[in-house]
Amino acid sequence: MSYLSYLKQPKKKRELNAFLRIYGVYKKVIYHYLNEPNSPLNEELNIFYIRKLVPAIQKLAKDLKLDSMIAKKNINLSSNYILFSSLFVSEKILQNMRKDSDYAKVEVSNIYGQIKELVEFVKAVMQEPIPEIEEIIDEGRELINASEFTKTKTEQEKEGVRIKGKKRIWLPQFPRTEWAKVSIKFTEERSIILSDSRDNKPCEPQNFGLIDERTGKPDATWKFLIKVAKGNGVTDPIKKDERELQKKQKQALTDILRTIFKNNTPPFETRKGGIYVANFNIKYFEEEENRTIPKEKVKYLDLEKVRSEMTESTQENVEYDIKHNLNPDKDGEYSQ
């Protein structure tokens, strides 16, 4: 049996088709890593590459006998289909070869093209997927998509856009402002005024993407902002098991404020007990029932109450006035 006849067997056609599909993911991973060597998801991508992607490709190659002498004599396929043992050593390997990243991209593209031609030649284009290979393919695609999404999100946030799920929220923008000049003043529970000491911009939770889609009400991050405002810029100490959740809320608000005021320094300081202190000015609106009476007026309250009771036109007071010939003058004072 010739090698090509061997590949035309139903089982081998299925494996060859899977080899093409998973090598397509391999090509995308190589391209992504070489284009974005500093991506925050590259560590996770490299673990996937070492533990799942490369072993799966090597197993399929072994099952298809791609490294055998008979295969090399009958098909045009490079034996160097795995370029790097780890993504993190790719730069060093290319330097030792005196090659650049473009060389690696061309190499994997050529190999992918060779596999595709072989698949088409043996008519293995439409085959039932191999479940365990499809799982690895899906995982690889998800990692690449997540990394691309993170890159897009970072770029858009630099332009004043906040990404929340599939939505883009255009945040209000100020010139770069020091936190000491930033102020946030609540006018109502759902309304604030942002200021950089020169310009004022009214905002609501939806302007920051801080609305819970399930309830239509402000989410936990907006409630954290209220908490900071009610404490005049300082949050209360909280239990250890509550700190991680509040830390996430603080971080979400930090990202928003940094984007709005173009200031990458921390808008909050962290203290013991899970306390956060705002480096900007923040004030909550005074609710009518909670408004405090100035100290200088407190001492007169009791006197005013007594005077009110004394001058009240009750039947008892009127009879007393008549008996003692007391009549109020035009200024409301009594004379005998």
Image: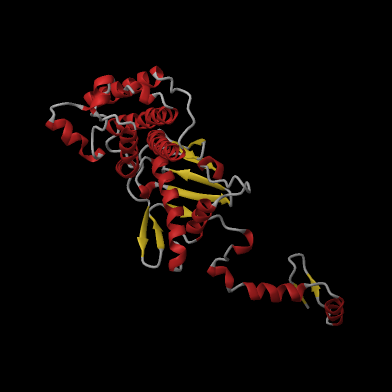
Going 57% across and 65% down the picture, which residue do you hit? 292
Residue 2 horizontal side relative to residue 96, left or right? right
- Residue in the foreground of this view, choosing between 180 and 310: 180
Residue 51 against residue 79 in the figure, above or below: below
Residue 208 horizontal side relative to residue 280, left or right? right
Assign the N terminus to one quadrant of the image: top left
- Residue 268 location (% of width, % of height): 38, 54
Residue 185 horizontal side relative to residue 145, left or right? right
Residue 217 against residue 176 in the figure, above or below: below
Going 53% across and 40% down the picture, which residue do you hit? 207
- Residue in the foreground of this view, choosing between 81 and 75: 75
Residue 261 against residue 303 in the figure, above or below: above
Going 36% across and 64% down the picture, which residue do you hit? 271
Residue 209 against residue 266 in the figure, above or below: above
Q: Can residue 236 be seen in this view?
A: no
- Residue 42 location (% of width, % of height): 31, 41
